[in-house]
Amino acid sequence: MEKKIRTLIVDDEELARIDLRHMLTDHSSIEIVGEASTIKEAKKAILELKPDVIFLDIEFPGESGFDLLNMIDESIKIVFITAFDEFAIRAFDVNACDYLLKPVSTKRLAQTIKKLEAGSLDLKHQDSVFSYDDQVFIAVNYKHYFIRVSSIIRIASEGKYPEILTTTKIKGLVKKSLQEWEKCLPEKRFIRIHRSTIINIEFVEKIVKDNISAYSVYMKGSEEKYQISRRYTSLLKKKIVL
């Protein structure tokens, strides 16, 4: 017997829940175990019903669907649903696996369910490169933020987790490694200058020559000095005249 995918619908609009429920019932692999119209109801339903996947609206009156993320186990798949194009972002640092734009099309929903059935729906591990104007949704010091890629000044790693700094004064630890960030950031704007540092060349304030072959860089919005290792000096020279 085919194992059903236990599904919870979370949306404050009743008509939207009804429409989605009707579309989901056309798929034999889906078992709708419940619905919720508020974040409070959703929290209770998640604990009681233990769904495999949540179709989650983003915009709620006075709150956000993202408020649920800190209490959802990473084994639960999340499919964001939104009426706003600006929220159609690649979820980079949360356990989101897809997004659907309202009104949800039957064709697009079928694609999502097909991937759910195959267990291959996971945006987090895609190696797609962000564009400079993309928004990403990340956890910084356990709080979630939308940030534009263009606002990132630098990402530096001193320990297990890298620290991000943005023009919007967001500063703190992120889960993704420098290697993962390096794969996703647009290479025309970002460059690794050290094994522990990636910078946005748009925010380079000055480059200082420390000795015959060693350089350091100062970034706008930061008083810190970042060493440029010899390994990466030649790469930086191609983008910035030293």
Image (spheres, grey):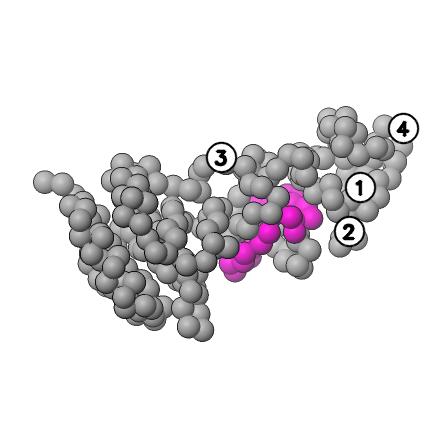
**Residue carrying label 4:** 212
Q: Which mark is residue 217?
A: 1
Q: Amino acid at mark 3?
A: Asp
- The residue positioned 72% from the left and 35% from the top of the image is 193
Q: Amino acid at mark 4?
A: Ile
**Vertical arrangement, residue 135 with respect to residue 241, above or below:** below
Say what secondary structure mark 2 lies in. loop
Local packing at callout 4 (Cα closer than 10 Å; few below 14, some 14-19, many 20+) is: few
Q: Which mark is residue 220?
A: 2
- The residue positioned 58% from the left and 41% from the top of the image is 131
Rounded to the nearest angstrom, the CA distance separating label 3 from label 1 is 29 Å
| Horizontal arrangement in the rendering, residue 52 relative to residue 173 (left or right) | left
Q: Main secondary structure of the magenta part?
A: strand
**Residue carrying label 3:** 127
Q: Which mark is residue 235?
A: none
Q: Which residues are magenta?
A: 139-163
Q: Amino acid at mark 1?
A: Val
**Vertical arrangement, residue 215 with respect to residue 12, above or below:** above
| Horizontal arrangement in the rendering, residue 213 relative to residue 229 (left or right) | right
Task: Say if the magenta span includes residue 72.
Answer: no
